[in-house]
Image: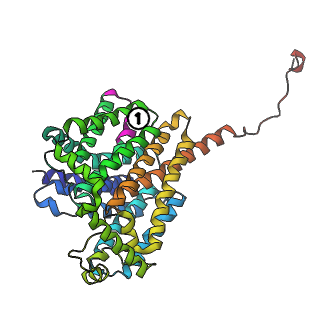
């Protein structure tokens, strides 16, 4: 039953996507991150909705009269360079069939993120994209949070598929999304909407617990502290943290507590030791081929994996965004990846400074702060997960770049208006008295 309305809606979005490409980029972000087709059970389950929306958007973008240039920022240059580099490494991939399939998927995301950076030229568009990012992932947080509270963490939550299919990936995506809900809560005016967003944050935290992800538990604890530091409304941020603690104390069963306690026993944990094994493999690949690495999904080359990991019974994926990029794309790829997100974090800080103290730019100052919180969550939690090419962090980069460009343009226009020279007119003559005028 869900297939028909979803298909009609997405087919109906193709015309607006061609007419207004910025709408197409928002719809693509929604479809790509939320995996909408995986919420159906019929003919729509395998339909290439993302590809169709991407095609319509690109056609409209090419035909549009709007500027095709992205903001001039270091993050944009690094993003383009990284996209070019992962394309070069794919040529030398050691698992070519799998590598090409992954490269096609990633290239589609990168291309639409670039188009997004050229079309998010207004405050309204940026806020809409931010809200779509929050809702796309937050939907699973809200849904899973209700389940977790109702069942008391009786069963582990799993993602819809794609990048966030397993419990750990879903947990990290929810952690990265949480500050976006906090941002929306800070800028909306309607009390009822603010309460809904508070509920969204609470349910998202409950979902993080419901995933039973040990890494996410550590990350959300650290991120809540950072959000408390960066947030202007520290009372709200503090209450969110207390709510998280209350959920753990009130709803987590003994089995969950026992699982979290195994964090300190990593030497006895098979999962942790398998990560060390896979990290070692990716490091070895980078040492053997330091420039281009092994290409996407190099671990699927069974002969190569077993030659570098003697006695391995299974080919293990990298289990870390850092070792993922290192093994797949070499030291050059890792340097570009780290530089990209470090530059984005710095730019978010610059956004805060540019907008601070200016009432009309409050939306941008708060956005910069929460973007930094999300990036910290991604950087810390990603150390244990294969999410180097997950859509959301790249959209956070795009939002940072575009919001900074809008604020810079706003400040430049204000300065130009303040320093504008009046149009030339007759010379000014002081009034000395009645005798100066004609009789």
In this picture the colour scheme is rainbow
Total marks drawn?
1
Q: Give me the residue at 34% from left, 55% from top.
A: 24
Residue reaching furthest top?
434
> Left or right of 41: which side holds 85?
right
Q: Give me the residue at 39% from left, 46% from top.
A: 222
- Magenta-colored stretch includes residue 96: no
Q: Where's residue 104, x and y in %?
A: 32, 71
- Magenta-colored stretch includes residue 182: yes
Q: Where's residue 425, x and y in %?
A: 77, 36
> Left or right of 348: which side holds 193?
left
Q: Where's residue 124, x and y in %?
A: 42, 43
Question: Residue 87 occupies which quadrant of the picture?
Answer: bottom left
Residue reaching furthest right?
435
> Left or right of 334: which side holds 206?
left
Q: Main secondary structure of the magenta part?
A: helix
Segment tinted magenta in the rendering? 181-191
* Res 38 visible: yes
Q: Is residue 281 above or below residue 232?
A: below
Q: Where's residue 362, x and y in %?
A: 49, 36
Q: In front: 194, or 254?
A: 254
Q: Is residue 103 above or below residue 79?
A: below
Q: Which residue does the numbered mark 1 point to in the structure image?
A: 186
* Res 13 visible: no
Quarter that holds the C terminus: top right
How many residues crowd around disc 1 within 10 Å: few (fewer than 14), some, or many (20 or more)?
some
Q: In front: 316, or 296?
A: 316
Question: Residue 49 occupies which quadrant of the picture?
Answer: bottom left
The residue tagged with tag 1: helix, strand or loop?
helix
Q: In front: 129, or 331?
A: 331
Q: In front: 330, or 260?
A: 260
């Amino acid at each position: 039953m869900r297939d028909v309305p979803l298909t009609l809606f997405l087919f109906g979005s193709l015309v607006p996507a061609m007419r207004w490409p910025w709408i197409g980029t928002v719809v693509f972000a929604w479809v790509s991150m939320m995996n909408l087709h995986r919420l159906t059970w019929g003919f729509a389950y395998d339909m290439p909705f993302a590809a169709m929306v991407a095609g319509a958007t690109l056609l409209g973008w090419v035909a549009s009269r709007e500027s095709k240039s992205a903001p001039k920022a270091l993050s944009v240059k690094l993003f383009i360079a990284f996209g070019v580099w992962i394309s070069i490494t794919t040529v030398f991939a050691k698992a070519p069939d799998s590598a090409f399939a992954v490269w096609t998927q990633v290239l589609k995301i990168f291309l639409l993120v670039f188009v997004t950076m050229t079309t998010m030229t207004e405050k309204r568009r940026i806020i809409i994209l931010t809200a779509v990012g929050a809702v796309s992932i937050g939907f699973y947080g809200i849904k899973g949070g209700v389940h977790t509270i109702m069942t008391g963490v009786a069963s582990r939550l799993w993602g819809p598929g794609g990048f966030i299919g397993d419990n750990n990936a879903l947990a990290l995506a929810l952690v990265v999304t949480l500050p976006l809900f906090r941002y929306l809560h800070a800028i909306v005016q309607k009390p009822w909407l603010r309460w809904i967003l508070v509920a969204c944050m609470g349910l998202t935290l409950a979902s993080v617990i419901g995933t039973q992800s040990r890494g996410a538990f550590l990350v959300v604890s650290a991120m809540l502290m950072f959000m408390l530091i960066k947030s202007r409304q520290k009372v709200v941020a503090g209450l969110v943290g207390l709510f998280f603690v209350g959920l753990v104390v009130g709803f987590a069963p003994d089995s969950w507590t026992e699982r979290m306690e195994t964090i300190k026993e990593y030497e006895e944990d098979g999962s942790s030791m398998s990560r060390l094994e896979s990290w070692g493999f990716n490091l070895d690949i980078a040492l053997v081929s330091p420039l281009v690495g092994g290409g996407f999904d190099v671990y699927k080359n069974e002969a190569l994996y077993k030659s570098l990991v003697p006695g391995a019974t299974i080919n293990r994926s990298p289990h870390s965004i850092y070792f993922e990029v290192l093994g797949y794309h070499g030291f050059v790829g890792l340097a570009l990846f780290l530089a990209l997100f470090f530059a984005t974090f710095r730019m978010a800080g610059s956004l805060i400074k540019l907008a601070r103290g200016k009432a009309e730019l409050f939306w941008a100052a708060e956005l910069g702060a929460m973007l930094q919180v999300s990036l910290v969550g991604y950087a810390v939690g990603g150390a244990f997960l294969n999410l180097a090419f997950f859509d959301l962090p790249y959209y956070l980069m795009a939002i940072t770049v575009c919001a900074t460009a809008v604020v810079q343009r706003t400040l430049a226009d204000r300065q130009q208006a303040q320093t504008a020279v009046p149009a030339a007119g007759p010379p000014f003559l002081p009034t000395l008295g009645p005798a100066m005028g004609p009789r």
